[in-house]
Image (cartoon, rainbow, N blue to C red):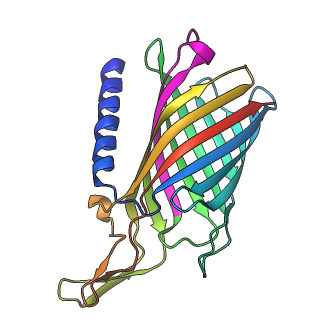
Amino acid sequence: MKKTILILCLLTSLLTSIFISAQIIETDKTMLWTSFGLSKKLNDKFSISYFQLNSLSLKDSRFNFIQPDLKIGYKLNKKWDLSINYTPTISLDTVQGNQSIFHRVSSRIRVSTKVSKRIRMKNSITTEFHFTQRSKFKQRIYYRLDLFYRDTKLPWRLRPFISQKLYWYSGGRLLQYYDTDGVKTDLKAPNGLHAYRIKTGIKLYPTDKVSFSLYYQKQKEFNSSLFGTREINSLNPNSNKIRRSFYDFSVIGVSLNYKL
């Protein structure tokens, strides 16, 4: 049964990735994300870590943002764990009117499952609270699925992985909606299921304390009819303009982590 579920997950990941690759018209084209992390196990239950993400636009060779992240983790048992994160995002672009810093606090609950002898799966739910208003959301909730192959006999314990995230937006700035005749209808936040990310790559362990990752990631924003989701890219028929367009992008990523 577990193997059947795994195969279905992998097929869904592959088909979704192909669909996104075919449909995506990127807003910010391909970015390079580099990151460095430090982690420390305090005792059998608690751990603390610092992680910094740096984003560079490959299209015009400019920095997008720097994103430090401080996390406190708590291990409930062998399968379940909790964490709380504080993550400011420091914007480095020169677009007039853009905020220079965004603040975010998030909490996560995660369960780890052994699917087979070599394959592991992690499922998690994360809730984000953005204390600096974003145009499309003030809170985000996302479900994350991680699948990875684990074999200690491979060089540097090489670990292929695939990760998926599905985002629900809430509390964004009010957006004006129109009917087909161009008459104003609702003025509401575009709450709903609006973004999907898929990431695939490899993770290496040169030593017990050092891990290194290479990955490729895509994001696709969309509208959904589920649970009364409202459109992000609402069209004004009178001007034929869209006030908030989708934000789609690709990422080439490199990550280095060290355990203290």
**Residue 155 image offset from top left, x and y in percent:** 59, 14
Q: Work out which residue is located at the far top of the displayed protein and give it.
A: 153
* 65 is higher (above) or lower (below) than 53: below
- The x and y percentages for residue 140 are 51, 58
Q: Position of residue 136 (x, y in %)?
A: 47, 70
Q: Quadrant of residue 83?
A: top right
How many marks the image carries: the answer is 0
Q: Residue lying farthest left? A: 181
Please give the name of the residue rendered at 66% of the width and 66% of the height, measured from the top-left corner: 92
Is 229 in the magenta? no
Is residue 62 at all visible to an observer of this figure? yes
Is 154 rendered above or below residue 29?
Answer: above
Q: Is residue 146 visible?
A: no
Left or right of 190: which side holds 46? right
Q: Position of residue 158 (x, y in %)?
A: 56, 20
Give the prevailing secondary structure in the magenta stretch.
strand
Residue 116 located left or right of residue 181 = right
Quadrant in which the N terminus is drawn: top left
Residue drawn at the location 51% of the way across and 44% of the way down: 125
Q: Residue at x 68, y 57 (%)?
A: 66
Q: Nearer the viewer, residue 161 or 21?
A: 21
Occupied quadrant, residue 221: bottom left
Q: Is residue 148 magenta?
A: yes
Quadrant holding the C terminus: top right
**Stretch of the chain drawn in magenta:** 139-165
Q: Is residue 206 left or right of residue 143?
A: right
In the image, is residue 160 above or below residue 117?
below
